[in-house]
Image (cartoon, rainbow, N blue to C red):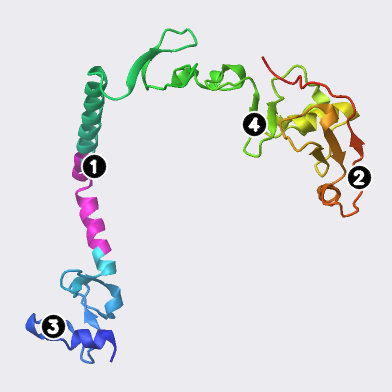
Amino acid sequence: MSEQTELFNSKQIKKRHYHKRISSDGQEWRCCRCQRYMPISKFSINKKTGMPYSFCKKCDCAMHHEYYMKHREEILRKDKIYRDSRLEYERNRMLKFKTNGGGTWIKVMCDCGCGIEFWVQRCNAKGRRYFDKEHMKGHMKGPKATRWYGGRYVNKRNYVIINARNNPEIPDWLKIMCSKSGFIAEHRLIVARAIGRPLKKEETVHHIDGNKGNNTEGNLALFASASAHIRWVRHDGGPGPIWQGEEELDSIFVVD
């Protein structure tokens, strides 16, 4: 016996006179609005009683739409009043919170020299600078950024990365190897400058002493591919490096 038949034969239907809305074969339910018999899947179920509602889903949506179109102006007016009151409440609460000196909000002046004062959250970072939202775009790139560290940092793989876009010491023909954000690995930059051409994507640079931070020219070797580099490191008889530095020169690609 299906769940639908068990529902129609239950004592709850007979007790609450639901049997008046059941079809003769006991498999369909009648909508009180359109007066049509349809399967129970066409009705929404009341979670409290477990019984179908009086109207089918289609009639229920039509009734809601008719009510909305009839009282549309009143509904939109009440909704606007609620949103305005909520916005005013949040504005007053934040203003009271700031003026009383609570939390981590401080009042600062824009560092671009425009004289605009605004509220920001306190930041304990050393050398942090604050800019107004209207002036933020012009002060977020290069040395004007709030977290500028000289254009040189160490990534998660312990490789030294350089910002080549704003570095006047790097020629344009070497900037072809830069990423979309303008950064390039220092060891690849040094090898490319030593051999006089940009490196190919498949070419790999090896650190002889294993220290990825030691980017002196004498500590670097160039392999034609990553597979050749792995075979040479594992002593599997692979081809050796196509270039290896001899002179040790200090890394000079640093932006002041």
> Is 244 left or right of 74, judged from the image as shown?
right
2 or 4: tag closer to the N-terminus: 4
CA gap, disc 4 and disc 1: 55 Å
Look at mark 3 in the image and give the residue it sits on. 13
Task: Give the amino acid at mark 4.
Answer: Val
Q: Secondary structure at mark 1?
A: helix
3 or 2: tag closer to the N-terminus: 3
Task: Give the amino acid at mark 3.
Answer: Ile
Which disc is residue 76 wearing?
A: 1
Look at mark 2 in the image and give the residue it sits on. 240
* Residue 208 magenta-highlighted: no
Residue 105 visible, this angle: yes
Magenta segment boundaries in residue numbering: 61-78
4 or 1: tag closer to the N-terminus: 1
Look at mark 4 in the image and give the residue it sits on. 154
Q: Is residue 144 above or below residue 190?
A: above
Give the crowd class for mark 1: few <14, some 14-19, many >=20 residues within 10 Å: few
Residue 178 locus on image (x, y percent): 74, 32
Q: Secondary structure at mark 3?
A: helix
- Observer-side mark, 4 or 1, equals 4
CA gap, disc 3 and disc 4: 73 Å
